[in-house]
Image (spheres, rainbow, N blue to C red):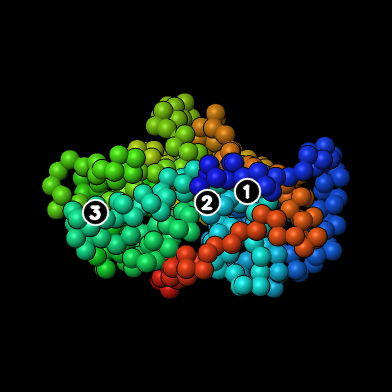
Amino acid sequence: MALIDLLTAQDQQMPENYKHLSVEEMEKRIREIKVEMGTDLFIPGHHYQKDEVIQFADATGDSLQLARLSAQQDAQYIVFCGVHFMAETADILTSDQQKVVLPDMRAGCSMADMADHKQTEEAWDMLQQLFGDTILPLTYVNSTAEIKAFVGKNGGATVTSSNAKKMIQWAFTQKQRLLFLPDQHLGRNTAAALGISINDMAVWNPINSELEYEGRLEDIKVILWKGHCSVHENFTVKNVDYLRKHDPDRKIIVHPECKREVVTRSDLSGSTKYIIDTIEKAEKGTKWAIGTEMNLVNRLIGQHPNKDIISLNPYTCPCLTMNRIDLPHLLWSLEEVVARKNTNQIIVEHQIATLSKQALERMLSLS
């Protein structure tokens, strides 16, 4: 579902009275529901969620990890505290008896929405005309079910920020070129880390329906979809250069969704799990600047008071759509579950789910 559709969905909006409850009232009722529902309820919470929501999560992690955990539960109801594409992945991987609920349908992902099905099919047709049957599509798991299905249909696979290197290596055993959706920065950073020249990478612009590249077409190895994460684009070379000048002892670690020039100037780069693990293993008293979503950075600051941790960009803000889910929406969705209503249930159409699962399973079989 596109972000504009989520934002204009009016039929299942939270009733006004939830906005007037005190924090204590909401927290008390959520705890009561969790006890009442027992193992019939599972609440996964993504790393980027607010602390007020994460405190009630039965598991925290990245999107694919949480979707796979959801599928392992006996719970009939999965109340997914994340964004729309994450709940879609959970619905794809869970059983038909399980119901996946998104507390706020406006919780979308701008990056996932930068590649829609129509644009992708049109791009694929044009790229096939240019390059013939030499391209394998890969998509970041941060994509819609329709894009995962497109990739599955065309022999490709999903990737995570943790296994992107392995999946790109696999792609080149299948075809001469790859199309990487929807985040150009993860694709560029990963391909470059594997030794592929920036000069051999082109960018597909879905707005203008054109290939952005200067050089010979036959030299192109990687075609990057022109999409990005609005949060990680806020980390800049100026942020890095400022710290190098004014705080040179501070190590900089960033997510590979950041721009190439930011990644190359940082000390370390890796997935959300890599960032969390690195900070946990770091020695006491070490100084860190982290380039990723602010809720997670603040959580790491709170969890590691014996380390000096800051955000790489002190003026960045949390992911706005991720932050749509708050205590009132969580409580409302749980009370709808208790009433056995299917409010905000995420249902991926069967054919799309089948093709998406093929893309996911190709990745999982290689992980």
Judged from the image, the secondary structure of the residue bearing numbered disc 1 is: loop
Amino acid marked by disc 2? Met
Circle on res. 180: none
Q: What is the count of numbered marks?
A: 3
Q: Percent position (x, y) of residue 243?
A: 46, 30
What residue is pinned by disc 3?
127
- Quarter of the image holding residue 304? top right
Residue 38 position (above or below residue 332): below
Mark 3 surroundings: few (<14), some (14-19) or many (≥20) residues within 10 A: some
Image quarter of residue 336? bottom right
Q: Residue at x 46, y 54 (%)?
A: 143
**Amino acid bearing label 3:** Leu
**Residue 347 percent coordinates (x, y):** 59, 62
Mark 2 secondary-structure assignment: loop
Q: Earlier in the sequence, mark 1 or mark 2?
A: 2
Badge 3 element = helix
Q: Amino acid at mark 1?
A: Met
Determine whether, in the image, residue 286 is placed left or right of residue 221.
Answer: right
Location of residue 275 in the rendering, given as x and y in whole percent from the top left corner: 52, 50
Distance between mark 3 and mark 2 Cα atoms: 25 Å
Q: For label 2, count other residues whose C-alpha is less than 10 Å away and answer few (under 14), some (14-19) or many (20+).
A: some
Q: Which residue is mark 1?
A: 105
Q: Which residue is mark 2?
A: 1
Kindly identify the residue that appears in the image at 33 percent across and 65 percent down. 154
Q: Residue at x 15, y 49 (%)?
A: 217
Q: Is residue 73 left or right of residue 146?
A: right
Q: Nearer the viewer, residue 60 or 360?
A: 360
Residue 44, visible in the rendered structure: no
